[in-house]
Image (cartoon, helix red, strand yellow):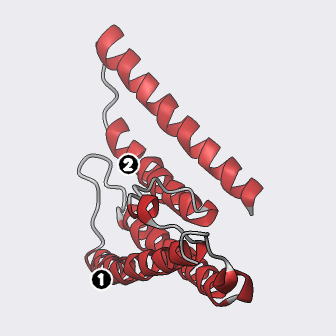
């Protein structure tokens, strides 16, 4: 799965970069803009953003500002903080996923189209729900890992000299 994600993300970023390159060259150098290129770039761009976020969730490499970890001294405290963070992330993420689901249902019902090329935007809107759902799966899996680490006897017995 890691290889497939890497290949897919690479293809998407190359498509977006190539499309932007063509747009800049045709619009500003040749002064002949390509009509509808922005609309067609919406598809790989949004899928790239959402699948990139899914990949960061899968690898647990999101950028975090863990200021509280500075004040925590034991591994157990770090695990408790991680569980709290994952629970909050999961709660907010599930709320946003429900919104994405409602938006996707609306998009199916209305079957919106892009203004110039009349491409159905349903496929772009699907990226929001699918990406959020996948991120919530990985967040739930990380929550389970943190809870297991918190409940393991090794984490419970780990303390620093300051605590003793």
The residue at which mark 2 appears reads as 42
Residue 133 shows in this picture: no
Mark 1 is surrounded, within 10 Å at the Cα level, by few (under 14), some (14 to 19) or many (20 or more) other residues, namely few
User: At 31% from the left edge and 18% from the top edge, which residue is drawn?
Assistant: 27
- How many numbered discs, if any? 2
Residue found at x 41% / y 43%: 41
Instruction: Point out residue 123 in the picture as x, y percentages from the top left corner.
Output: 43, 65
**Is there any visible trace of residue 70 in the rendered image?**
yes
The one nearer the camera, 12 or 163, is 163
Taking 65 as reference, is 27 left or right? left
Q: Position of residue 101 (x, y in %)?
A: 36, 81
Q: Disc 1 designates what residue?
A: 102
Q: Please determine whether, in this image, residue 33 is positioned above or below residue 1.
A: above
Query: Separation of disc 2 and disc 1 at Cα?
Result: 21 Å
The N terminus lies in quadrant: bottom right
Q: Quadrant of the C terminus?
A: bottom right
Give the image location of residue 126, x and y in percent: 42, 70
């Amino acid at each position: 799965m890691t290889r497939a994600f890497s290949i897919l993300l690479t293809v998407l970023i190359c498509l977006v970069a190539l499309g932007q390159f063509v747009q800049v060259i045709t619009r500003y150098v040749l002064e002949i803009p390509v009509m509808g290129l922005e609309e067609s770039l919406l598809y790989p761009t949004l899928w790239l953003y959402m699948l990139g976020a899914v990949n960061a969730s899968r690898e647990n490499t999101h950028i975090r500002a863990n200021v509280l970890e500075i004040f925590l001294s034991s591994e157990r405290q770090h695990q408790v903080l991680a569980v709290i963070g994952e629970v909050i992330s999961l709660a907010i993420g599930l709320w946003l996923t429900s919104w994405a689901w409602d938006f996707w249902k609306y998009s199916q019902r209305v079957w919106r189209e892009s203004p110039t090329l009349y491409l159905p935007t349903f496929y772009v809107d699907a990226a929001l729900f699918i990406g959020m759902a996948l991120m919530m799966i990985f967040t739930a899996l990380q929550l389970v890992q943190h809870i297991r680490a918190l409940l393991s006897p090794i984490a419970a017995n780990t303390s620093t000299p300051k605590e003793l």
